[in-house]
Amino acid sequence: MLSRTAENLYWTSRYLERADSIARLLEVAYRISLIPNTQEGYNNEWESILATSGTKEEYLILNKEIKKEKIEHFLLFDNRNFSSVRNCIEKARDNIKMVRTAVTLEVWNAVNTLFYRYEEFVKKKYNSKELPEILDLIKRQVNLIKGTVLNTQLQNDGFDFLTLGNYFERADFTARIIDVKYFILLPSSSFVGTQVDNFRWSLMLRSVSSYRAFKWAYGNSEIDYIKIIDFLVLNAKCPRSLFFSVEKIYHHLNRLKKNYGEKSISINKINLLYKKLKNTSVNEILDEGLHDFLTSFIKDISSVYQSVEKKYFMSS
């Protein structure tokens, strides 16, 4: 496969996953806004969305205050925001358009449909009342695209690059949201064990669409940060966990190695990261410090990507 084609497939998938992640963050904040008497949590949640998406500084340059409607528009439609849903969808379509012969007609149509349906909202003045409808469109169509890829694409090297884009983005996003929300939601002495405390921790799970999965895994036991860290970092069955994403990256990079018959630095790096997570416990993470652990993880997963980029996307 040509390096340019591989890169286009990778970024198509990564941009779609980023659009979906932003939509899920906004959905959680929207739910909070419907709950009375949560002004402090409400402000923290909207600000944490900007921090998690890495756009807080950029937002504050353009807007002087943390305001719900402005944040919604900034994350959904502002073309000055590189990671806005609008830009992500446009970039995903642009990338896949350049390699249409590398994907099935069904995959192309699914991406194209998302673009034109979202354009209907882009072209008209934004109304905050439409937020649930917009978020539902993004989540539904991205899931449709992923299902179409899974069920119609030949599972060759092109499929590997599509999958890698998805899980590199998910690993990075999950690590960042845990890091940001952990400090916002750190239990205070006045709230520990109360319904308010449990609700706050449930927000982290809802932000990555893992609330129900957590309940299945842990039954009716109370939600607390130790279980959440275990679930979102180390659980091999949770599709949003760091370990799950690393395992997928590990698998598909090894498929590429076998397919091309060449050694790669990225294989060595992902092997080390995979073994580290597999042999780590929650207590060891907390002893190291969650923030330090996640900072190290984000750095490591970025290093793996840089090796993938050098090996597969910059080849002559």
Image: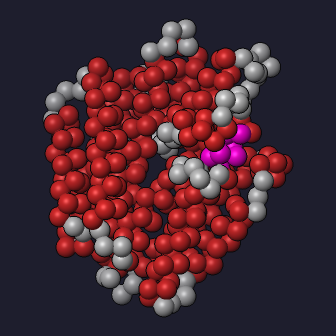
Residue 229 covered by magenta stretch: yes
Q: Where 179 sits versus 134, above or below? A: below
State the residue at coordinates (58%, 78%): 267
Picture quarter with the C terminus: bottom left
From the image, give the main secondary structure of the stretch colored magenta.
helix
State the residue at coordinates (20%, 37%): 122
77 and 159: which is toward the camera: 159
- Residue reaching furthest top? 37
183 and 74: which is toward the camera: 183
State the residue at coordinates (50%, 83%): 257
Which x, y percent locates residue 200?
62, 25
Q: Where 207 sits versus 297, above or below? A: above
Which x, y percent locates residue 191?
73, 18
Picture quarter with the N terminus: bottom left
Q: Indicate left or right for 165 with 286 as reference.
A: left
Q: Answer whether residue 279 is visible to the viewer in this image.
A: yes
Which x, y percent locates residue 96?
25, 64
State the residue at coordinates (70%, 46%): 230
175 and 280: which is toward the camera: 280
Q: Indicate left or right for 123 with 70 as reference.
A: left
Which segment is the magenta one? 227-233
> In the picture, residue 22 is in which quadrant?
top left
Q: Where 256 sits versus 284, above or below? A: below
Counting the numbered discs, the total is 0
